[in-house]
Image: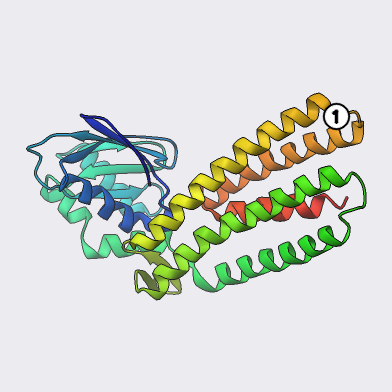
Amino acid sequence: MIKKKNHKNKIVYNNYQFYEIAALTGFIEKQTTEGYSLCGAMGKFLDILKFCYAKTEVPKSYAIFRKHLDEEIDEKIENMKTGNGKIICQNNLYIIFENASSEVAEMKSEMVEKKRNILLGVPIKKSIAFVSMLFVISVISLVLKILLIEDGNLHFNLLNLGLYLALIITFLFYFIGDLHDIISGNGISIDGKIYFSSRTKFKDILFRIGDILKFGILLGSICISIVLLLNVKDVVIAINILRMWLIYCAISYTSRLRFQRSYISLLLIEVFLITLSFW
């Protein structure tokens, strides 16, 4: 989490993954013990959370639900929206209730939470196979790129190699954070799927570092690309830069929808960039 505070509110960048709804709920509830209540959110995936400060605020509990996961859950959400349930914020995908009524307490029942966590959980076997496949392709392609570093424009190839390595390293920060919490017992496995009930401090630090690196890669890539396009004399290099950004934007948009803003998109982008660069 990256936070920005003033005397009356706090803005938080939400880097919780879609399979960490239970952990995100715990984080939001923890803020109430410090006098901050959730009062808004921005982004399709609740990317930005806004907390309002009230010194006399008592601890509250919240219920976060993903819409269109299950007909029974959707029906209860609609009943709450027309009843006494207090909606803190909602968009096309998510809705957050403040636990101020018996209806919300019912929504947070063990059965509903278990169903939500299973539906949002990550399939263990499929995920291991998918990440392993991407990582093997990435390593093989990276070795080939190093061996062929002098084939073409050396300066441009070195910049690309730096980008590929940065994406892999950033992915590993996030991945190690998840792996650490699984080993620590924060990852809960149900019916072949895994979700996280809370976060350790170590994982939170790794995710913050990953966020900084991710934004640094994006900003640095934009600046370097602009400088190269303004000074390049080789049309082929200019075309390669534009193609790289086209691939990046297409894969980023697709993976954001498919993987719900998951960090797996970093490895996916790297694999597509490095494999398509051989063409």
Amino acid type, callout 1: Val
Q: Which is nearer the eye, 157 or 98?
A: 157
Name the residue rendered at 9%, 44% in the picture. 58
Q: Is residue 161 above or below residue 40?
A: below
Q: How many marks?
A: 1
Left or right? Give the position of 234 relative to 183: right
Left or right? Give the position of 82 relative to 126: left
Name the residue rendered at 86%, 62% in the picture. 147
Q: Is residue 98 above or below residue 171?
A: above
Write down the residue under mark 1. 232
SS assignment at label 1: loop
Q: Is residue 37 above or below residue 181?
A: above
Residue 21: image location, x then y, percent: 35, 54
Name the residue rendered at 20%, 39% in the picture. 37
- Badge 1 density bin: few <14, some 14–19, many ≥20, Cα 10 Å: few
Left or right? Give the position of 265 relative to 247: left
Q: Which is nearer the eye, 278 or 259?
A: 278
- Which residue occupies the extreme left position in the image? 56
Figure coloring: rainbow
Residue 232: image location, x then y, percent: 85, 29
Q: Which is nearer the eye, 79 or 130?
A: 130
- Which residue occupies the extreme front position in the image? 155
Residue 198 image-quadrant placement: bottom left
- Which residue occupies the extreme top position in the image? 230
Q: Is residue 231 above or below residue 203?
A: above
Name the residue rendered at 92%, 52% in the picture. 151
Residue 253: image location, x then y, percent: 61, 41
Q: Which is nearer the eye, 184 or 114?
A: 184
Residue 113 image-quadrant placement: bottom left
Residue 135 image-quadrant placement: bottom right
Residue 234: image location, x then y, percent: 91, 32
